[in-house]
Amino acid sequence: AIDNLKRRKRTDREEREDAAAKEKVELEIVRESMKCHFVEKRIREDCKSAEKSSKDERESNNDNNNEKLKGMGRMRKKKKRRQGK
C-alpha cells in the first residue's frame, strides 16, 4: 500500500512536471511568434515611412526644379527685353 502511494505521488509529480514543461514550450512558441509579428510590423512601418519620405523628396525636387525653370523663364524674358532695346 505504501509503495502504491509513493508510485502515485511520483506519477502525479511527473505529470505536473510534464504539464509545466509543455506549458513552458507553448509559452516560448507564443513568445517567438509574437517577436516575429512585431518584427514584421516594424519592417512594414519602416517601408511605409521610407516610401513616404522618398515621395516627399521627389515632390520637393520637383518643386525646386519648377522654381528653377520659372527663374530661367524670367532670365530669357529679361534677355529678350535687353536685345529689343
Image (cartoon, rainbow, N blue to C red):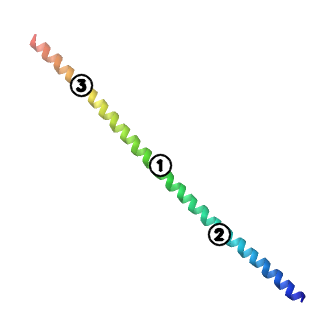
Q: Quadrant of residue 34?
A: bottom right
Look at the picture and state if 72 lies above or below 57: above
Q: Earlier in the sequence, mark 2 or mark 3?
A: 2
Give the CA separation, mark 3 to mark 1: 37 Å
Residue drawn at 46 percent across, 48 percent down: 46
**Which element carries disc 3, helix, strand or loop?**
helix
Say which of 68 and 19 sits in front.
19
Q: Is residue 81 left or right of residue 18?
A: left
Residue under circle 3? Answer: 70
What x and y, as percent, mark residue 44?
Answer: 46, 52
Q: Split into 4 quadrants, where in the image is the C terminus?
A: top left
**Residue that extends furthest to the top in the rendered view of this protein:** 85
Residue drawn at 47 percent across, 52 percent down: 43
Q: Earlier in the sequence, mark 1 or mark 2?
A: 2
Look at the picture and state if 8 lies above or below 64: below
What x and y, as percent, mark residue 61?
Answer: 32, 34
What x and y, as percent, mark residue 62?
Answer: 30, 34
**Which element carries disc 2, helix, strand or loop?**
helix
What x and y, as percent, mark residue 49?
Answer: 44, 44
Q: Tag on residue 45?
A: 1
Question: Dot 2: within a 10 Å radius of its alpha carbon, few (fewer than 14), some, or many (20 or more) residues?
Answer: few
Look at the picture and state if 38 lies above or below 61: below
Residue under circle 2? Answer: 25
